Amino acid sequence: MRLASITTRIANVKKSAQANAHRAALREQIVAHPEVANVLRAFPPRLRRNVNIYGGEHSDDVSLFLSLYSLDSLKSDKRLLAALAPFTGDEWAATTHDYMYHEPNRDFAFTKKVAIDIKPNAHSRWLDKHGYNIPTSFTLSVRIAAYAKTDSPTCRIVVKEVREKVVQEEIKEIVCA
């Protein structure tokens, strides 16, 4: 198999860069989608100003992120329950992840696909003309990082068990004759 010429390879990279630029320009419509504003409005008013919104730089994702600190509990704190309530419906896929460093921390993550009809413009026409897909949906995600107080009487880090591990590591070197 013969490698493509330098000119052809550079042309391919240039076309890929152009496609990425056109896709990036379309992301403006994704971030401006009404569902993004609806999700932001779903947060309790007193928490909304603390919600950060990120548009994917290399993907068609939009993320909303909120951190809640000094919670009395990760199960019954009113601020946390109010922030989680809008995202408990069946349209959201939910996961949690616990971290046990300095204080009890649980991250709640919610995702859903949102359909989008990209308005025709120079960017969508270029992508279509050159055989690239135009997004028909995007992933909307919400992440709430909840931190309990280190002295919370109802939520603390406890040692569940202790496991001993034996680790063997091979040390290698290159030997050439």
Image (spheres, rainbow, N blue to C red):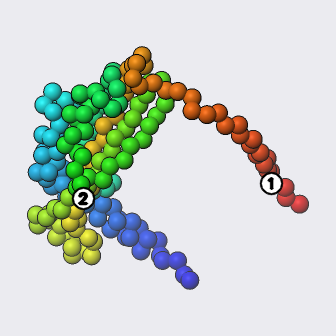
Instruction: Identify the residue at image location x=45%, y=24%.
Output: 156
Residue 3 lies, in percent from the top left, at: 52, 77
Q: Amino acid at mark 2?
A: Lys
The residue that disc 2 covers is: 113
Q: Would residue 156 be found to the left or right of residue 32 on screen?
A: right
Picture quadrant of residue 153: top left
Instruction: Identify the residue at image location x=18%, y=62%.
Output: 115
Residue 176 lies, in percent from the top left, at: 85, 58
Residue 63 lies, in percent from the top left, at: 27, 45
Residue reaching furthest to the bottom: 1
Q: Quadrant of the N terminus?
A: bottom right
Task: Confirm whether residue 32 shows in the render.
Answer: no
Q: Amino acid at mark 1?
A: Ile
Picture quadrant of residue 174: bottom right
Q: Toward the viewer: 39 or 124?
A: 39
Question: Could you tell which of marks 1 and 2 lies nearer the N-terminus?
Answer: 2
Instruction: Identify the residue at image location x=30%, y=60%.
Output: 20
Q: Is residue 154 above or below residue 33?
A: above
Task: Confirm whether residue 12 shows in the render.
Answer: yes
The residue that disc 1 covers is: 174
Q: Toward the viewer: 64 or 7?
A: 64
